[in-house]
Image (cartoon, coloured by chain):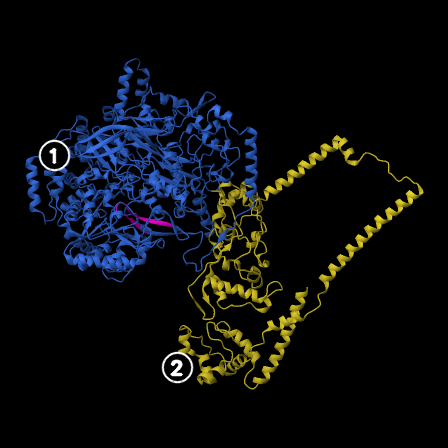
Chain colours: A yellow, B blue
Amino acid sequence: MKQVNHRKLGKNILRLSLVILLAFSTSLSAQEGDPANGKSLFNANCAACHKLDKKMTGPALRNVEQRLSDDEGLDREWLHSWIRNSSSMIKAGDAYANKIFNEYGGAAMTAFPQLSDQDINDILAYTAEEAPAAPVGVQAVVADGGGSDGSSMSNKIILGALTVLFALLAMALVLVRQTLNRFAEAKGVDVSETKGTPIWKAFIQNQFLVLVSVIILLLASGYFVYGYFMQVGVDQGYQPVQPIHYSHKIHAGDNGIDCKYCHSSARVSKHSGIPSLNVCMNCHKSIYEVSPETATEEYSKEFYDGEIKKLYAAVGWDDAEQKYTGETQPVKWVRIHNLPDFAYFNHSQHVSVAGIECQTCHGPVEEMEIMYQHASLTMGWCINCHRETNVKVEDNAYYTKIHEELSKKYGVDKLTAAQMGGLECGKCHY
Amino acid sequence: MSSNKKYWKSVEELNENSSIVETLKQNEFVEEIPTDEFLGNKESLESSKTTRRDFLKYVGFSTAAASLAACEGPVVKSIPYVVQPEEITPGVANYYATTIADGYDYASVLVKTREGRPIKIENNTLAATNGHANARVNASVLGLYDSMRIQGPMKAGEPISWSEFDAEVGQKLASVSSSGKAIVLLTQTYASPSTSKLVSEFKAKFGNVRHVQYDAISESAALDAYEANYGERGLANYDFAKAMTIVSFGADFLGDWQGGGFDSGYAKNKIPTNGKMSRHIQFESNMSLTGANADKRVSLTPSQQKVALAKLYSAVVGGSVSGELPQHIEEAVQKAASQLKKAGSKGVVVTGIQDVNAQTVVLAINSHLNSQAFDPETPIKIRQGNDKEVMTLVADMKAGKVGAILMSGVNPLYTLPNAGDFSEGLKQTDLSVAFTMKADETALETEYQAAVPHYLESWGDVELKKGHFALTQPTIRPLFDTRQFQETLLKLTDNNLSYHDYLKQTWTASILGNTSFSQALHDGMYVSGSAAADAMQTTTTSTTSEEDKKTWVGGIIEDVAEGVGLKDKEDSATTTTTTSNSVAAAPVAISAGDAARKLGATATSNGLELALYSKTAMGDGQQANNPWLQEMPDPITRTTWDNYVTVSQADAKELGIKNWHVADGGLNGSVVELAVNGVTVTAPVIIQPGQAKGSIGLAFGYGRRAGLKEEMQTGVNAYPLYMDFNPTPGNVSLTVVGGEHEFACVQLHNTLMGRGDIIKETTLEIFNTKDKKHWNAIPVVSLNHQETPVTSPEVDLWDEFDRSIGHHFNLSIDLNACTGCGACVIACHAENNVPVVGKEEIRRSRDMHWLRIDRYYSSEDTFAGDNSKKEETKGLAIIDAFDEMETAAANPQVAFQPVMCQHCNHAPCETVCPVAATSHGRQGQNHMAYNRCVGTRYCANNCPYKVRRFNWFLYNKNDEFDYHMNDDLGRMVLNPDVTVRSRGVMEKCSMCIQKTQKTILDAKRDGRVIKDGEFQTACSAACGSGAMVFGDVNDKDSQVAKLKEDNRMYHLLEHVGTKPNVMYHTKVRNTTEA
């Protein structure tokens, strides 16, 4: 609770500072361009290769106009023609154009002839804005300064008070009893109770009860022992700590990336495949940090950014220089779903042929911050599904004949996987 | 008729009064099982301190401890690629076409790789130029993961770097070159256009370079004869699919004769179609695979073979020859001649006699017959070795004339008969380099050992036959710091190209016409039809012909003549003149008539004659460290892990040689000392039915000691007896020495138990003229006093399940087409992770082969009459009767029968399993759930076919079984789709359910119907002769469904009523003599 409050507070401060900044900067560059429009244009056209403060496919663009005129003596006109058609400038032999071209590995910048002068001016205005003050510091200050921490503490106090109360009550009862006994003694009343047979003796004497309870005891212990042994090797809920904190929630949930984009071999192979690191780099070449909104109370932005750094270290990506160093360090993931060697499971059979959603077996992966084993992965679990699931025969010429014959034989419209032979031992054990 | 024939598995069984056979009929074991050995005696049991209660405590405690310990699962790591190669999807196999060319085996193959690891060799159906992959080629993938490979270049046993190696060798070569001494390249037959080109560039750079090609088992005489007659150094090419009458004199053409690869064509005409099939007559001394498949086999000594060949020549072509042959052989030769003449161009004669005269005579007969099977256009190029040059080299080395020797693909210190001389010569060289994968006999004595990659890690090309070019491409990055021989040659000739680029250049420049290199690489093969390739051909021959010119025929004739004790004065005079005249000339064609006369004059040897041969499993011995091959039973003797002297029964009796069975069913044999021209070898003996009297056999390829795991150091080395490259030396003396040898033989594990109809056999005549019930009768039982076939549902104890829906797999095995080559056995090992158990365990009948090829002998004329005669004979006359039977055994007929799990629809194993670990699938396969099995072995006991195998031990990661599954490298060959079984579970053939399931899944994913031929098992895919056909019988148009309706079809032990899904086709022999 407390942290949520703080985050909101921090956000508010952030918003506030942004508004102030915006207002300030707008007034500065009003005559030249509109930074708000520039921002949207920048995000639409430039952001794939440029960031304001960080070198990416192309150079960092913060204050690019100022920098160019200071360092190279190039004016806005140069920038206009460069943005509209850089390759013709390179061909024409412009010195700085060629220098940039070579510095960034000979990759020509996409031409934007559709941008008007005003558009470019707007973009340049946006790039000329001051970098926003780091919100981290603000947050930290607020976190330090914040005092009140209400509810959780008060819960404890209430509980403590209750405990004290109950203890007092118990003491009072004992005291009352002692007092009453003393009164009785004083009055000569005999308070000693008539001693009947104690309950345990009565129990032992009743042989029937003993028998029944022994049987119940045995059955119960049998049940629990059996239950204990049956869960040996069943790792439902197994949630190991992984070398890189990879959040399926962020990728599959928040960003809606299709499972099979990364686990592509699930379509054709028995393995779903842990994606190789080059697949990660398809996106993470440009996503070098998470947005502040991604951070949660549990995992800060720094934490997530650190995890992306781990990926860079593993794949050998030098983020500052924007190039691969060649020094790789394969990631040793901890395997979560472990089928025994004697069971054969093929992803493509289920994913491509049967068209089963990944979530059917793997659970709500898109909500999992840390991946865990959702299903029990026992044979009973497999078989149960095979009994209940209909085979997807539509538009599959393979099934046409066998489905027709089998459905006639069993007198059903839709065949289950079991009726198709999916319960035979040898289909999975060889 | 067929079922009345008596079959027997060992000589012992013919011995009716043998107590062993009697006992085995009643009991499983000959003697009481020595339980005392493991239980100890009563006294020690009673005096033991551990009481029964204590024992139970220990058991209870350890069980509890074990189950508690099992509660924590291990943490499994999963490491993905950093950058995943585009063509690799984990879990999906890739196939690459490549070519093996190891100097002995040459074949165009497909390599199955999983996650970048080659795991299996398959036939390249796109380019079957050299037949199919034999057992050794199938097993060669394991050689890649051999833990004994040397892992980098070495100098006198110490690792050095390749740059040091290049510098030192280059410098030494330069100094040798300037000193005027010879530089010698001693290599295997590469038959590689690119390598030839490289060698000529190497010659141009250093000058005074000699390239000597050396085949461990030489075909030099055949090469010389062919060269003399056709002007090109090659081996005569035959296509047996075009021959209806085949006469062979000692040519094991279903084995390794001329590099093998003839069985596919041969098998085509062995299947009777329209009442016709080929007739094959084999004249040979050892019982070979080819002789075992022959319709008629005549056993005779090697020297008699020469005379017989000469007589055949005179009968077919004309001209008179001298020479005497025993009456029955003479008759057989005349009959063969008349059949050949009748067959005309449909006839063919082949010979394996390493004698220029014999080879010339055969070429003459074939061209006289105008044989269609003989193809002089495309000679086989995969043997180029030249005996004479090798011998000259050894002499030169001894004389100190050789300054440097670079050896690649050869192991002369093991394979040369005069290895001692070679070793001496090696010491006199200034530089000796062995390009080798192993620290083998030769590498140990050379100065440098240059580690070379396995063929699955190399580039290369081979001209298998004239105009038939095959490419070798790497299927994995080199596992070790190795560099192939050609790369080193490129470095030494200061060429900066990689061998891949060099190869590509050579191919695009002079081999490929309009085809692209990528296409050729994809196919693995390029057959030229254009003139461009012919031009290439001439250039390669001209580069080698310089040395070839030094070849001459005379010397060989002289050697052979001496070897067999021929050589009268006149002959020696003529050969000597030839010698002196033709030193620099090309081989001179000898007139076939003269050759035949010389052959006819061959004197039969006084002593025994030795016939050296190569075994199906081991070949020339370069794969001796391959446990699959060591454990593969010899098709004839069914013996594993050994080589041995084979002798005939008659000779054995004379010399006092014995084979006997001991308590556990193992076979023991006498040990003999073999002396040939002063060289002695001590070896065990197996009495071989069908071995020609007066001859003995011994296999090459065994007895290696260097660079092998201890378990693989088996057998004796036969190469020292291979003097002057004569595989059939005469005047051999054999003396029994003390001691006995324990064989690991899978032959007499069980007798036939009176179930003689397991194999059905008939003759072509009966097959053509009589009704099916005469030669392939379905057994009947009595139902209401009516004879009812056992296949009828009325007499069935079991309910029939409906199997008409979906797939129903059947495997068909044609006993006529099966040659017993064993490729399927190794393919099954590779596909199904079948463990190797070692010699000791095999001897205890604990072999794990899922697929065995049973070999049955039948006495040629032992039909019903003989059986009753035996029973009727009383008193002393029985001795004569047994003698007769022994003569019958002197030359038995042989039948091969591959047996694997029969996947019975009414399976006896399924009903007895207490835990339902084995059950039946709708698709006809008998499933085996290993994880469910508790190891009662009831199923194995109840199996009428004895195909179930029990894991007596843990065969992987167990130092007691130090084979490939015990090291990380060797385990890379395991098929990831098949469970590796643990101790205490039963296993058996699964009908490759992983393959059928994959085929089904692929079709489902593509949404299509499965075509006939898509379903394959490992064995049916490996079978090159077409004997094994696998498929879905519910697909009425499939080949296997048609085969099921064939008249020759029968099931194994049909009367048991198991309704197997494996079917056999009655063997038909063409016994028509005229």
Identify residue type, mark 1: Leu
In the image, B325: left or right of B998?
Answer: left
Q: Which of B344 and B929 is in front in this view?
A: B929
Q: Position of residue B855 (x, y in %)?
A: 33, 32
Q: In which quarter of the image is the N terminus of chain B?
A: top left
What residue is drawn where x is 91% and y is 42%?
Answer: A185
- In the image, residue B812 above or below residue A89: above
Q: Which chain carries label 2?
A: A
User: Would you name the residue on which mark 1 appears?
Assistant: B566
Observer able to see residue B947:
yes
Q: Position of residue B308 (x, y in %)?
A: 16, 32
Observer able to see residue A87:
no
User: Would you name the residue on which mark 2 appears?
Assistant: A95
Per the rendered image, the range of residues in magenta is B98-112
Measured in 3D between alpha carbons, the distance from the residue under mark 2 to the one under mark 1, in whole angstroms, is 93 Å
Outermost residue on the right side: it is A187
Label 2 sits on a secondary structure element that is: helix
What is the magenta segment's predominant secondary structure?
strand
In the image, A149: left or right of B275?
Answer: right
Neighbour tally class for label 1: few under 14, some 14-19, many 20 plus, Cα within 10 Å? many
In the image, B222: left or right of B135?
Answer: left
In the image, B226: left or right of B277?
Answer: left
Q: Where is residue B70 in the image (x, y as percent from the top left)?
A: 54, 43
Membership of B544 in magenta stretch: no
| Residue B621 figure quarter | top left
